[in-house]
Amino acid sequence: MPRPPTKAQAITNALAARIVEGELDPGTWLPSERELARRYEADRSTVRRALRMLAEQGLVQLRHGSGAQVRTGRRVRRAAADITRQVGAWRGFHVSAQKDGRTPFTRTTVSEVEASERLAPRLDVPPGTRVLERARVQGVEGEPPIQTATTWVILDVVEQIPVLREVDTGPGGIYSRLEEAGYRITFEESVTCRLPCADEQETLEVGANRPVLTLWRRAYDQNGRVIEVTHRVVVGDRHELVYRYGSGA
């Protein structure tokens, strides 16, 4: 049976939920240590420990003599469907960031790799199959990165569309190039949540206790074949993912 969280962790979780859900706006000052201790029936040393954990998660800034303030960085609100259409020169993350009035950035590296035991089943290929890997770090100017996004494309598609090996694949990115080549794509996406691993902490500039979303997206062609897989790791409180669906969506 799992152990219940410590008192400090329970306070951290309660305050983190209020921040992530938007109940406490960016720039808001948390109640004083004395008030938090009274509210959560804890001693002030426990409250101080909880506030330090919130700061380690990047949710608040601790200001000596003033207290704890909710960080002021805004989340990018992203529509899940933004990957399905080209808006100007962009799709995906850039569309949502620009719509939100921010200036997006992407750092991309391209290489050829072997499909790992973990990746191969998602691409429906044997482990060790050579595939094209496009690894990206994305965010908005002036703030830490929001996500990593790594895409793998099967090589016979790359041979058909050589520009996929370039860092800049042109307006609309790889999905526009696939559509131009006659592919009609259906997407499937799964979403989970976990704590970041060491390299993600460094790349995304997050603490070890700050949750990230992990998203796996498969792209199927008109024949039901998987031609591309993308894995995104997103800092949860820097990003809001919106799904719109239904008969009138």
Image: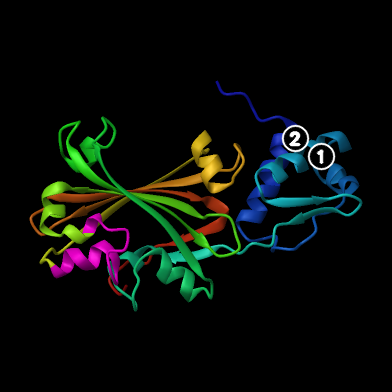
Residue 166 relative to residue 80: left or right: left
Residue nearest the observer in this picture, 33 or 93: 93
Q: Would you place residue 66 above or below residue 103 in this image? A: above
Quick check: is 175 in the magenta stretch?
Answer: yes
Q: In the orientation shown, which residue stands out farthest toward the top?
A: 1
Report which residue position mark 1 lands on.
47
State the quadrant of the N terminus: top right
- Looking at the rendered structure, the secondary structure element under dot 1 is helix
- Looking at the rendered structure, the secondary structure element under dot 2 is helix
Question: Mark 1 and mark 2: span between their CA atoms?
Answer: 6 Å
The numbered mark at residue 8 is 2
Image x and y of residue 211, in percent? 55, 43
Quick check: is 24 in the magenta stretch?
Answer: no
Magenta span: 164-180
Q: Label 2 amino acid?
A: Ala
Residue visible at 17% across and 58% down in the picture:
162
